[in-house]
Image (spheres, grey):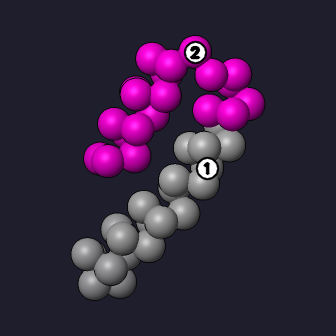
């Protein structure tokens, strides 16, 4: 859910598309770790 909010926020910015993709990729790594920790996986 947080990652979706970040995706929407990035789309509202005037950054280059490549940077948006890079940043979202970097944010997805800790988001996945947190998701797994919260789900008990």
* Above or below: residue 5 compared with residue 16: below
- Residue at image point 50% right, 19% down: 13
- Residue at image point 51% right, 55% down: 28
Judged left or right of residue 8, residue 17 is right
In the rendered image, residue 39, in percent from the top left (x then y), is placed at 26, 76
- Residue at image point 62% right, 32% down: 20
Asked which quadrant contains residue 32, the reply is bottom left
* Above or below: residue 28 compared with residue 39: above
Label 2 Cα neighbours within 10 Å, binned few <14 / some 14-19 / many ≥20: few
Count of numbered badges drawn on the protein: 2
Asked which quadrant contains residue 38, the reply is bottom left
Q: Earlier in the sequence, mark 1 or mark 2?
A: 2
- Asked if residue 31 is among those painted magenta in the image, a careful observer would answer no
Residue at disc 1, secondary structure: helix
Label 1 Cα neighbours within 10 Å, binned few <14 / some 14-19 / many ≥20: few
Residue at disc 2, secondary structure: loop
Q: Which residues are magenta?
A: 1-20
Furthest residue to the front? 14
- Residue at image point 45% right, 17% down: 12
In the rendered image, residue 5, in percent from the top left (x then y), is placed at 33, 36
Q: Quadrant of the C terminus?
A: bottom left
Disc 2: which residue:
14
Q: Which mark is residue 15?
A: none
The label nearer to you, 1 versus 2, is 2
Q: Which mark is residue 25?
A: 1
What is the chief secondary structure element of the magenta stretch? helix
């Amino acid at each position: 859910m947080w990652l979706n909010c970040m995706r929407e926020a990035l789309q509202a910015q005037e950054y280059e598309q490549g940077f948006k993709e890079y940043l979202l990729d970097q944010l997805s790594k800790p988001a996945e770790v947190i998701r797994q920790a919260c789900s008990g996986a």
